[in-house]
């Protein structure tokens, strides 16, 4: 939650907190909240001290309800210096909105699609923002041998050491083999599941989009060719899908073959990455070489913070 003051709105001492410094004229801008509106989940202005608590807790509801994000509150000095009676407030009445579940028909459609898929795939970017969703995804992947592709990941969504992990992709890299062959794709929590100019699903793939904000309401341009879209929480949806698989007949032979296939491609990818990390005979240090040295030298629990800035010409 971001809070900012604003210039006093009185000049002649009509209220406590009127202007008393020259900068307060210069800092008075049109629609101060508007500067932040496109970058926050919610903005508001304190107009009286009498309901500051209610406005603040409403802002916190927006910040902590999915899709979670920053909120911006602003208050002029007259309001902030207003004398008010203490207001008791029960914060248990200002909780975040509860997670949304899949409709029964959605669970049925997804389960049936996964059971009949030849090459099922999960694409995600930030499913792991809720750590409880990660083991559920692992359980689903293990049950049906589903490939996992991470697009522009911003969280630890799935163990990179798992044989079903088919890699991460940001800009570049060309067509993902896992995405190209997938006949059923679950897009779970992703702002940019692929960049169609160079990487996209095969034509005719059945795509299910699961996200707390599938419309991407803050993005002026966004769409993917999904047959079904669901506004749902990843942890809740994965739990429902796993429950929906209970008692269903699973093609164990098909699952076994997929495990072998995904494991082989996963290992090939690891070998390719290992080659990139090898120090070349000319001694030149590339980015993969440098990061490989860090990865092998630092403790396993280390956290890498990388800030990258580049200019394109």
Image (cartoon, helix red, strand yellow):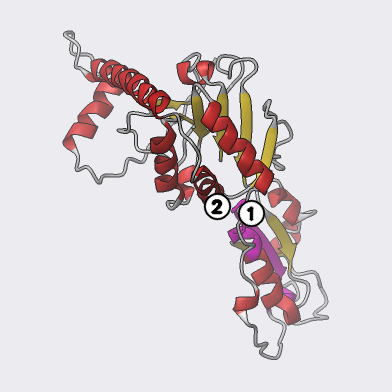
In primary-sequence order, the first of circles 1 and 2 is: 1
Residue 166 in percent (x, y) is at 40, 25
Is disc 1 surrounded by few (<14), some (14 to 19) or many (20+) residues within 10 Å? Answer: some
Residue 236's disc is 2
Q: Is residue 17 visible?
A: no
Find the distance from the CA under tag 1 to the CA under tag 2: 7 Å
**Residue that numbered label 1 is attached to:** 100
Q: Is residue 129 above or below residue 110?
A: below
Q: Is residue 53 above or below residue 123?
A: below
Point out the stretch of residues depicted in magenta.
61-80
Q: Is residue 148 above or below residue 232?
A: above
**Is residue 37 found inside the magenta-colored segment of the image?**
no
Q: Is residue 89 above or below residue 66?
A: below
Q: Nearer the viewer, residue 157 or 147?
A: 147
Quarter-wise, where is residue 46 in the image?
A: bottom right
Q: Is residue 302 visible?
A: yes
Q: Nearer the viewer, residue 234 or 280?
A: 234
Quarter-wise, where is residue 70 in the image?
A: bottom right
Q: Are marks 1 and 2 in contact (CB under 8 Å)?
A: yes
Residue at x 44%, y 33% (from the top left corner): 144
Residue at x 47%, y 51% (from the top left corner): 130
Q: Nearer the viewer, residue 145 or 185?
A: 145
Quarter-wise, where is residue 128 in the image?
A: top left
Left or right: where does residue 165 sit relative to residue 200?
left
Question: At numbered mark 2, what does the secondary structure look like: helix, strand or loop?
Answer: helix
Please identify the quadrant where the C terminus is shown: top right
Question: At numbered mark 1, what does the secondary structure look like: helix, strand or loop?
Answer: loop
Residue 1 in percent (x, y) is at 59, 61
């Amino acid at each position: 939650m971001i809070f900012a003051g604003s210039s006093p709105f009185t000049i002649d001492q009509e209220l406590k907190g009127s202007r008393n410094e020259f900068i307060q004229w210069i800092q008075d801008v049109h629609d101060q909240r508007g500067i932040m509106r496109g970058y926050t989940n919610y903005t508001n202005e304190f107009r009286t001290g009498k309901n500051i608590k209610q406005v603040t807790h409403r802002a916190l509801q927006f910040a902590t309800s999915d899709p979670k994000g920053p909120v911006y509150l602003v208050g002029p000095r007259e309001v902030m210096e207003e004398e008010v009676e203490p207001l008791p407030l029960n914060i248990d009445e200002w909780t975040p909105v509860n997670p949304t579940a899949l409709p029964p028909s959605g669970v049925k459609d997804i389960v049936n699609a996964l059971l009949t898929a030849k090459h099922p795939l999960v694409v995600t970017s930030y499913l792991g923002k809720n750590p409880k969703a990660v083991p559920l995804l692992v359980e689903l992947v293990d049950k049906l041998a589903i490939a996992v592709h991470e697009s522009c990941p911003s969280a630890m969504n799935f163990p990179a050491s798992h044989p079903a992990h088919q890699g991460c992709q940001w800009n570049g890299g060309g067509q993902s083999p896992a995405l190209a062959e997938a006949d059923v794709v679950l897009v779970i929590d992703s702002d940019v599941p692929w960049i169609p100019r160079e990487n996209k699903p095969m034509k005719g793939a059945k795509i299910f989009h699961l996200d707390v904000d599938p419309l991407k309401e803050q993005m002026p341009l966004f769409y993917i060719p999904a047959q079904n879209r669901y506004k749902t929480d990843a942890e809740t949806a994965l739990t429902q899908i796993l429950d929906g698989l209970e008692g269903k007949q699973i093609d164990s032979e098909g699952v076994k073959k997929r495990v072998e296939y995904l494991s082989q491609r996963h290992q090939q990818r690891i070998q390719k990455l290992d080659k990139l990390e090898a120090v070349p005979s000319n001694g030149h240090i590339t980015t993969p070489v440098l990061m490989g040295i860090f990865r092998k030298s630092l403790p396993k629990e280390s956290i890498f913070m990388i800030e990258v800035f580049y200019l394109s010409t």
